[in-house]
Image (spheres, grey):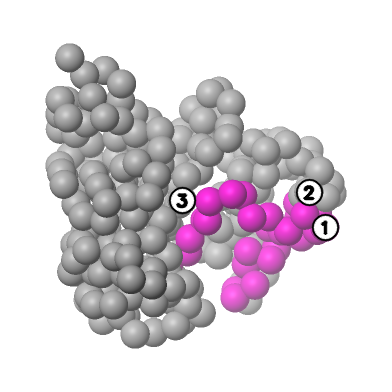
Amino acid sequence: MLEVKNLSVSYGGIKALKSISITVPDRQIVTLIGANGAGKSTTLRAISKLIKHDTGTIIYNGEDITNINARDTVKKGITMIPEGRHVFPDMTVMENLRLGAYLRNDKKQIREDIDYMFDLFPVLRERSSQLAGTLSGGEQQMLAVSRALMARPKMLMMDEPSLGLAPMLVKDIFAIIERVNKEDGLPILLIEQNANFALKVADYGYVLETGTIQLEGTGDQLLQNEKVKELYLGTGD
């Protein structure tokens, strides 16, 4: 599905990513974990073409998309949910959802997908006419996820979906991530500070440290790795 090969990114004279390579297979959840400043968000922004890269190649479904722009990346089916729950605060929940489908013309299917979003997040149905800016933080995150799914992405990238959420809501968000992956076969590239939750849902994971990949393996393998336990799970010996 997605292959990132030898990707490097610089901010001024600082190397944020140093020739990293990752793969997101079809129908799988892949996570990037690491400390703040490790290069996780930079990776997603480079794949989305929101920032320029120095070197490297990005292959999507066998096609080299390294040099296309951000809009064309979205048209290819790659959708990103950025950190910080960027909803449109002065628009209603329903208007936000419809905006997520702005590239689509299948009106009947759009209506059905809105119903599916309300099935995933019942509280959004109750809030459908409410301005998004008046929702709680957790409800805004639900809306951000739903709006991204309304685009019918072929691959979803998520940047810190649990940031600032209460523990119970974190469980709900990760349950939805697993559900859309399993039911819809949607491949997901996930960045998450909560390494424990991320690795439990991930098929595969990478550990980033100061712009380089230090470890990789299945979610279960990384959960059992002593270094990961010590640095990211708080359970090391």
Q: Are marks 1 and 3 in contact (CB under 8 Å)?
A: no
Residues drawn in magenta: 78-104
State the quadrant of the N terminus.
bottom left
Residue 63 visible somewhere in the drawing = no
- Estimate the x, y position of residue 197 in percent, counting from the top left: 38, 31
Is 48 one of the magenta-colored residues? Answer: no
- Inspect the image, locate mark 3, and give the three-letter code of the amino acid beneath it: Asp
Image vertical order of residue 157 relative to residue 7, above or below: above
Q: Judge by depth and name the residue closer to the eye, 223 or 26.
A: 223
- The residue under label 3 is 159
Task: Report whether 175 appears left or right of 197.
Answer: right
**CA gap, disc 2 and disc 3:** 20 Å
State the quadrant of the C terminus.
top left
Residue 133 visible somewhere in the drawing = yes
User: Which residue occupies 51% across, 37% down?
Assistant: 162
- The residue under label 2 is 133
User: Which residue occupies 61% across, 43% down?
Assistant: 142
> Which element is circle 2 on?
helix
- Inspect the image, locate mark 2, and give the three-letter code of the amino acid beneath it: Gly
Mark closer to the chain start, 1 or 2:
1
- Estimate the x, y position of residue 84 in percent, counting from the top left: 59, 49
- The residue under label 1 is 90
- Estimate the x, y position of residue 202 in percent, counting from the top left: 29, 40
Q: Judge by depth and name the residue closer to the eye, 197 or 175.
A: 197
Image vertical order of residue 27 relative to residue 110, above or below: above
Is 81 one of the magenta-colored residues? Answer: yes
Image quarter for residue 136?
Answer: top right
User: Which residue occupies 23% across, 25% down?
Assistant: 229
**CA gap, disc 1 and disc 3:** 23 Å
- Estimate the x, y position of residue 54 in percent, counting from the top left: 28, 77
Task: Report whether 10 appears left or right of 51.
Answer: left
Q: Quick one: which residue is furthest to the front in this view?
A: 13
